[in-house]
Image (spheres, coloured by chain):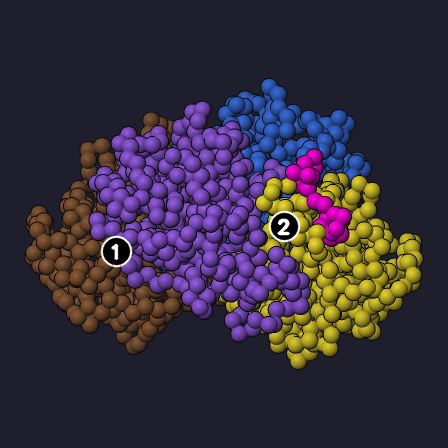
Chain colours: A purple, B brown, C blue, D yellow
Amino acid sequence: MTSETPGSATPPAAPIPVPTSPAPDVLRCASMELVVTDLARSREFYVDVLGLVVTAEDEQAVYLRSMEEFIHHNLILRKGEVPAVAAFSYRVRSPEDLDRAEAYYQEMGCPTVRNRTGFVRGVGDSVRVQDPLGFPYEFFHEVEHVERLAWRYDLHTPGALVRIDHFNQVTPDVPRAVDYMENLGFRVTEDIQDDGGTVYAAWMRRKSTVHDTAMTGGTGPRMHHVAFATHEKHNILAICDKLGALRRSDCIERGPGRHGVSNAFYLYLRDPDGHRIEIYTQDYYTGDPDNPRVTWDVHDNQRRDWWGNPVVPSWYTDASTVLDLDGAPVPTRERTDDSEMEVTIGADGFSYTRPDDAEQMPEWKQGEYKLGHQL
Amino acid sequence: MTSETPGSATPPAAPIPVPTSPAPDVLRCASMELVVTDLARSREFYVDVLGLVVTAEDEQAVYLRSMEEFIHHNLILRKGEVPAVAAFSYRVRSPEDLDRAEAYYQEMGCPTVRNRTGFVRGVGDSVRVQDPLGFPYEFFHEVEHVERLAWRYDLHTPGALVRIDHFNQVTPDVPRAVDYMENLGFRVTEDIQDDGGTVYAAWMRRKSTVHDTAMTGGTGPRMHHVAFATHEKHNILAICDKLGALRRSDCIERGPGRHGVSNAFYLYLRDPDGHRIEIYTQDYYTGDPDNPRVTWDVHDNQRRDWWGNPVVPSWYTDASTVLDLDGAPVPTRERTDDSEMEVTIGADGFSYTRPDDAEQMPEWKQGEYKLGHQL
Amino acid sequence: MTSETPGSATPPAAPIPVPTSPAPDVLRCASMELVVTDLARSREFYVDVLGLVVTAEDEQAVYLRSMEEFIHHNLILRKGEVPAVAAFSYRVRSPEDLDRAEAYYQEMGCPTVRNRTGFVRGVGDSVRVQDPLGFPYEFFHEVEHVERLAWRYDLHTPGALVRIDHFNQVTPDVPRAVDYMENLGFRVTEDIQDDGGTVYAAWMRRKSTVHDTAMTGGTGPRMHHVAFATHEKHNILAICDKLGALRRSDCIERGPGRHGVSNAFYLYLRDPDGHRIEIYTQDYYTGDPDNPRVTWDVHDNQRRDWWGNPVVPSWYTDASTVLDLDGAPVPTRERTDDSEMEVTIGADGFSYTRPDDAEQMPEWKQGEYKLGHQL
Amino acid sequence: MTSETPGSATPPAAPIPVPTSPAPDVLRCASMELVVTDLARSREFYVDVLGLVVTAEDEQAVYLRSMEEFIHHNLILRKGEVPAVAAFSYRVRSPEDLDRAEAYYQEMGCPTVRNRTGFVRGVGDSVRVQDPLGFPYEFFHEVEHVERLAWRYDLHTPGALVRIDHFNQVTPDVPRAVDYMENLGFRVTEDIQDDGGTVYAAWMRRKSTVHDTAMTGGTGPRMHHVAFATHEKHNILAICDKLGALRRSDCIERGPGRHGVSNAFYLYLRDPDGHRIEIYTQDYYTGDPDNPRVTWDVHDNQRRDWWGNPVVPSWYTDASTVLDLDGAPVPTRERTDDSEMEVTIGADGFSYTRPDDAEQMPEWKQGEYKLGHQL
């Protein structure tokens, strides 16, 4: 389900119109609604293993939040036939921003649905849209406040997740996606390019962190991951240690490590349905309007992992199906620009540690790189 | 200079007018200008001991920044006769916000000065005002960008300071100060009150942390402290360890500890002139407009230190002189509301660990509390 | 019960004879048997709050171990009328060492009792003695092995205690105690003295850490504390945070901080009966026979806390009663040598941060030191 | 030089005789003498990058120690033509143990050399032997004491190395090596075996940690790595971050990660000559004579990395040449027992996360495992 397969032969995407009506004022990425095939199994993973807190639950869904959250939830697990993402949910500044969101997306010709009492528990008036990239975006303002457990250290686990941090989306044409998101008020903080100007990925923020969402080039629309933050790096290591103790280390896909992009410490897990979860800590303040954009060379071997540790192929190829507003899987389109995996570890790809030193990989590292060539 | 002395017998402060012109859009606390009496000695403290980075310096001043900063400086050490604070400097969103700041303060009847090329190196068009509380506030937008050293781990020390986090100001009438700051666009995140509604301190933010500045009740205007953030708690412990190794542990005034208010981990140092510096890490996201305000009971012994460790008297009584726009010390006025120190550890004061358990302090703790009564 | 009171007017202690028979080969401090007045309340403290693991329990006692222990227990909570210590228990290298222990203490004229099936659950052949200083020492070798939970990260709490580290005993005449312990095969790693040669405390080891036990000068015999180790410093901070969350911060007596002596990071708690528990991490390897002894000047203000934070008086004055082999409280004798508290913070005492700089305490610190003078 | 090549066709090793004379009493692994081809380049790596402290140096050699060491050095870099190891150096308990060492190895028929004034600076009377496995072992007791920098936090770097922890040696026949080491007084703490009883590696200790040295099955004698300890895990991460900042991430060979064996947190680096260095922290106390041995199944994918991250092939195949007492490279012999790499990731190999679940590797992990099959 989540492995990379050729997308349907849809024609090249049309340009995304720029609405004349004002964009909604997005505060932050706030929640994701995941469709999972075995609710009990997923609950066990997110609650018993990762320590997210259950705000509410019923036979169809579990509503989870992180330790420092005061809104009703940051993650919904909803029972369904096929693993997928039903909503990338953003909180907006005011109730009026919902009117703006509705008008904004309607002007772009996108399907929109408004539900004055919310699509999910704990949330009020909401707008869901299928955005120009095909993703199911949700906007809401009204939300039930719940106890912020920041001071409840009696409930914190060694790997306590304290905040939802960001989404990451797979889309074939990154510059097209960036244009759309910039119009929506997002600002690019970092990206990965090559000398020819091909953009492989871009990170964009509303709140003052490196991102609320990122666009990763590939067959899409698909969901690459959703990320939760810990306070410190040892919290992330503790999650790994616990997975080892539970004999579930095989859900560790990549890391832990230090990102080049974002400078954050990271870990990628795969949940029981294969949905990818990042655990993330310590990026930097980006709230000034002239915050310097950092552009990384796609051949820089430290861009994805500052320590140069290899990215596993599945991290590049796998992602989750997203649903349209009727709950049907959204057909995907292939990327036509170069693939980051191919240009870095593929047959003609290359990576360097030092820009002027590409051919001088130490002998004992060459085996690893030849491996890369066989992918 | 910095110890608490009776303020001049100025009449009660007049109400602060609410301007009709729009307030400037403040991004964040950005820098403080400290007057120090021995520039070399202070440079040694901030650079060699604390590891701040020198962006520029000359015979009169040293310009310092934290590891993740991209603007020219977060702290200026300026040589002078008397230790004091010359400016609390905020960055605003746009050049136009300087016009707004000028008009806004002029409408309040405050002294203002504008310097189109900046009052200090590295900064352009700036407005300095003596605000209604008597503090020297500065606003700027244009600033020289410098290298963000976030990725330069070769330069990081064990106690690396990565960000300026907030100011803390002493003022006699906290609600009056809060009203003024709310008009300026700040939002209260936490405060300390008693049952009768007396407000002892309040924390206010523009950026999405617990505060850009706090108002602490006491003889003022004075500067209580300026705070820098580290990534993790062990970084703060490393600063203590280093001060011990340098046989300078006597510059540790209070902590390290966990705040109740803000939930951050903290340490207070005194610099060679007695200016107070906080090292701070891990408060929480506050960027939503309905972020819940946390009000602490002044008698809650965990409000200032979550672990119940006592606050040393100097922390309550000492603060730095502030200068007016001519560089003269601003006369202070005494607080007439109750004193937090007196109501908590003074002769008639009390603190509790559990609200309903005030009289049941363990026997071995009573000596400590009797001590408090003698202050 | 645990506060310092004048000891009985016993005559000066007689010299401790040096046995001609060989001393037992002590491996390490292994367990302490604490008498507690409310077994459920103490169990809640050690298990639910501190996270020690229950190996076994019945109506009279709870047997607890740390996460990396493979022997049956490191702490016994036994129900009794009066809070006290029933045994400081050391593990010896071989079964034959019990014969040696018995002969060794009998030659010194000490009361001894041998129990071939153990005095407590989980332990076999054991010798209990009332040693020449009045302490109830136990020696054993045979012990039930239990699961070492080192890899069971699913069971680790944020403040996981991984090892018993050491005991600390209060005794009036430290050099006399040191002589006795050296004959028993212990080696001094650090001590606190003054210029006149008065010894205030000494740390002694069998295993390769700074100590298995320490002798602290004061009215004794009494038990000062028993210490458990964590892996990292943040684990100790997490214990403080949790105590705050549980509104039990008043059980924090001193710290957290960095010791001068031992260089370890520490925290002192008081259990529901007032027994003192240290949480401790990161001292250094001492296993070489010529490991350099570190002698600290009693007036060095960084000896007890490397950061110069004050030691609370209760830490100097309070300690737990110890029991003789019949379970009766052992009468105490007063210290006649100078008191560390008096010579450092008493009316004629003093402490310095820099040896040659005793009179130059910063102005804002003097209040704190005057306080000290009033103790 | 360091890559695995077929050893010379030497006949099967003869049994190692058991001496009747007593073995020397080894305290701990204490130092390694490395031959490096560019002294300045290696000094830069160990001093400027890793922060080891220079005790002494001359044109031929640099003597380095860790922050908590009080003996003269833990590592010698000696200039030479070919990268190699000249000595694995152990400290013994007493001067008399050198006589014992000499007699012990002579009785085994090993080449021995004694130098009453030491083979290297800072060390006195010493014995060097070529042991029955072909390794150059050194024993010494007399040593110059230097300042223990444990309290010198002003000199600590974010990745401070505080102790030498262990050696790791490659030898074809692990059980044969273990027998020899057990006779020498070492005790096995952990090992890796398969169902058929083949032993792939064994860890052995004198001091109370998991090991002073380990024997790893492979073409030998060769030196696999020498390990230094940090206090905490973040110190190891800081080394990685710094290597990234210096654009030297390609010297990270494996990790960071959590070992299954030893439960320690680890990182493997390759120095400028390809010598492998481990950075290691937080194994457990092993000092009791009945310390439980932990045997890991070679197919357990968490034995080498508790989080299941793959071991890079170079880690299995590369190791450093060792020198005989004349400074000539010691010829190697191939392992005839099964290879750990082949049985786990080779064509017929397999690894499992859960013993009863070998065939249920998640789909997104299979690519990685197929890769393994191609090695």
Badge 1 vs badge 2, beta-carbon distance below 8 Å: no
As drawn, C27 above or below A60: below
Residue C63, given in percent of the width and then of the height, sits at: 62, 28
Name the main secondary structure of what is drawn in magenta.
loop
Q: Secondary structure at mark 2?
A: helix
Residue A224 location in percent, x, y?
A: 47, 47
Q: Calculate the distance from the C-alpha at mark 1 to the C-alpha at mark 2.
A: 47 Å
Magenta stretch holds residue D161: no
Amino acid type of the residue tagged 2 in the rendering: Glu
Q: Is residue C315 left or right of residue D317?
A: left
Stretch in magenta: D340-360
Q: Which residue is tagged 1? A: B27
Q: Position of residue A166 (x, y in %)?
A: 40, 47
Does residue A337 appear in the picture of this structure? Answer: yes
Chain under numbered label 2: D
The residue at the point 56 percent across, 64 percent down is: A349
Please report, as a chain letter, where disc 1 is located.
B
The image quadrant that residue A58 belongs to is top left
Query: Quick check: B345 left or right of D267?
Result: left
Left or right, D325 with respect to B222, comes to: right
Q: Is residue D117 above or below residue D370?
A: below
Q: Residue at x 52, y 23 (%)?
A: C40
Q: Is residue C218 visible?
A: no
- Residue identified by numbered label 2: D368
Quadrant (top left/top right/bottom left/bottom right) for the C terminus of chain C: top left
Measured from the top left, where is residue D172 in percent x and y? 82, 57
Q: Quadrant of residue C160?
A: top right
The residue lying toward the viewer, choosing from B307 and B175, is B175
The amino acid type of the residue labelled 1 equals Leu
Closer to the camera, D182 or D46?
D46
